[in-house]
Amino acid sequence: MATTTTTTAKPRKLRAKPHDRRKHLGGSDAAAVMGLSPWTTPVQLWMEKTGRAPERKPDPMRERVLKRGKKLEPIVLAMVVDKLRERGVDVELVARNRRYSDPTYPFLNVEIDFELVITGVLTINGEDIRFDREEVNGDCKTVTGFARKKWGDEDTEDVPIEYAAQFMTGLGVTGRDFCLVAALIGLDDVAIYWVKRDDETLAAMWPKLVDFWHEHVLADVAPDPLKYSDITALYPLDNGRTVEATPEVAEAAREHRRLGLEMDALKARRDMLQLTLGEYMADFKTLTVDGRPVYTLASFEDTSIDTTALRRDHPDWAALYARGGTVRALRPNKNFRG
């Protein structure tokens, strides 16, 4: 593979117009290329970029979340500017939602949520950093629920790694040194994080991004699968034929079957223990061991949809939300014991 590095040339500023995500790699794609994304594997990204990904049905909940995030961006930005000014620095907003492309590899282009010019001293990672009319990238994130645990202390670089890859890509394309991350926590507080440009990290990322685009997207060659779901995505239909295992694959089949049988036995044992605990607790709510609570058997309201009744009484509604298609499942032969 040829050596590929980021460039110090000025990035190209792109006009604000509709863009086809299949024709470029953006900052949010970087984590997937690196195998760091919790949502998208390299194979899934390749399928999206090459037009192979199945068309997704609209997800009303996801759409609401995205729209809410867009609506909150101006509010979050105003909160960030106020917070920075309270810390004694001068802040100037210079742009919002501007898109840039790498001058050497134009298929690498990113959209920056907001851009600031900062003058003053700020503490980042416990170190005082002086900014002298320095342009910084900015990104807004909404942090709720369990996701909050993935974020570290404010005024550090401790952001989720999948986001760090996105922000670092933005720094690589724009050539800037800092990305300010505005994380909305709750309704009235925004935490500020900083991702600092790291040329060693960028030198490792850029060849992988370029290789993914040239050797996989343009060459139309799938990357190596990372998950079992990648296999069924690449090969959704079987060909009806039989293949003989190599010694290595035969051993994998034996071990997979052995683990499956062990898991079945463990589940049966766990179910038996659950019965023992339930019989003993009866209508008691809490079980203690040495005076300390170890289990609860609490009552709570549970609501579910009776799909059988829905299909019977309102078949048109059920059909509207039904999802179907061909699937492949890996199942052992009932006579194969490993």
Image (cartoon, grey):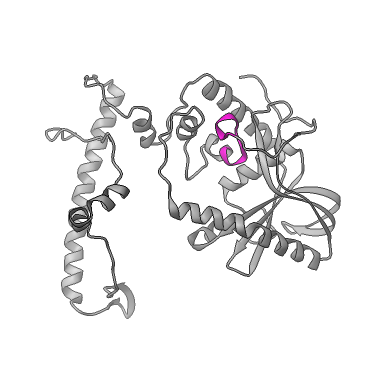
Is residue 182 found left or right of 11 in the rendered image?
left
Q: Which image quarter holds the C terminus?
A: top left
Pick the front one: 61 or 112: 61
Image vertical order of residue 192 relative to residue 137, above or below = below
Q: Which residues are magenta?
A: 20-29
- Picture residue at 27% right of the left edge, 47% below the top: 319
Q: Which image quarter holds the N terminus?
A: top right
User: Is residue 170 in the magenta section?
Assistant: no
Q: Position of residue 218 (x, y in %)?
A: 55, 21
- Picture residue at 61% right of the left edge, 58% below the top: 71
Residue 230: which quarter of the image? top left
Pick the front one: 203 or 69: 69
Q: Position of residue 7 (x, y in %)?
A: 75, 30
Is residue 54 found left or right of 75 in the rendered image?
left
Q: Position of residue 320 (x, y in %)?
A: 31, 48
- Picture residue at 79% right of the left edge, 68% below the top: 86
User: Is residue 25 in the magenta section?
Assistant: yes
Question: Residue furthest toward the right?
Answer: 132
Pick the front one: 184 or 67: 67
Pick the front one: 335 or 151: 151
